[in-house]
Amino acid sequence: MTVDATGQRGLVLVVEDEPSIADLVRLYLGRDGFGVHLERDGTAGLAAARRLRPVACVLDITLPGLAGTEICRRLREAGDWTPVIFLTARDDEVDRIVGLELGADDYVTKPFSPRELVARVRAVLRRTVGAPDGPDRPRTVGPVTLDPARRTVLAAGAPVQLTSTEFDLLAHLMARPGRVFTREELLAGVWGYAAHAGTRTVDVHVAQVRAKLGPASVIRTHRGVGYAANG
């Protein structure tokens, strides 16, 4: 266990068992004003997440004790929606991670730039603390009502729990019903990434939001183009 000062941007929990990667992540997050609490195994990482209430968690997937995916699953089951970013060694794990509805907000594939990871942490925290754009008044499209100020969603009158990324994706689409957004536009507008970062994550998060909204889903696919909220 390694603990740095809380930092002006808040405390980030990093659970990574490779010392060189863990130390590099801690160094760059610290330079950006974050405090860092570092754990080397999943069991201690889960306990730290529950005890410390960090502003974000950076979790390696393959860990001794508990896998990063299991940490995320247990946090979400307990109603803890602290933003989670996975560190993954293989791209093909991503579909399984999100497809199992674990509630992760983002992922970074190894090897990665530590500056990119810091940018991802900052981006997910921006999404957590405020609406992505537009007025704070509630928006209603069909059976779905989204309140940007309270960051709540109702589907056919029933509350729906979304991660910060899922919420902002839905808010972005509902801000302009009927307008078709390309995957690149959504990646830039919601995630804040350059288009070259890859657009598969958009498809996976859209699938997550649709699954949570169920029959009330208002997201339409425009094959070969992108997505829109029902106009």
Image: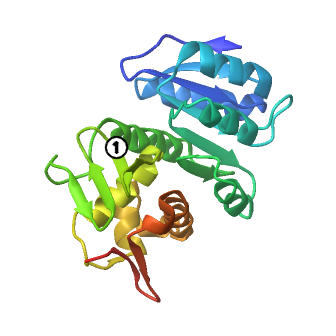
Q: Is residue 229 left or right of residue 117?
A: left
Residue that protrudes farthest toward the bottom in the picture: 224
Pick the quarter of the image with the N terminus. top right
Residue drawn at 51 percent across, 32 percent down: 82
Q: Relative to residue 48, is residue 216 depicted above or below?
A: below
Give the image location of residue 12, x and y in percent: 52, 25
- Residue furthest front as drawn: 157
Q: Position of residue 62 (x, y in %)?
A: 80, 41
- Residue 100 sits in which quadrant? bottom right
| Front-lying residue, 223 or 28 | 223
Q: Position of residue 119 (x, y in %)?
A: 44, 44
Front residue of 33 and 48: 48
Image coords of residue 215 (percent x, y): 48, 68
Q: Residues within 10 Å of mark 1 (few under 14, many from 20)?
A: some
- Residue at point 68%, 39% (across, down): 73
In which quadrant of the rendered view does residue 17 lie?
top right
Image quadrant in which the C terminus is located? bottom left
Query: Identity of the amino acid at label 1?
Result: Thr
> Is 210 drawn above or below residue 132 in the view shown?
below
* Left or right: where 52 falls relative to 137: right
Q: Disc 1 designates what residue?
A: 152
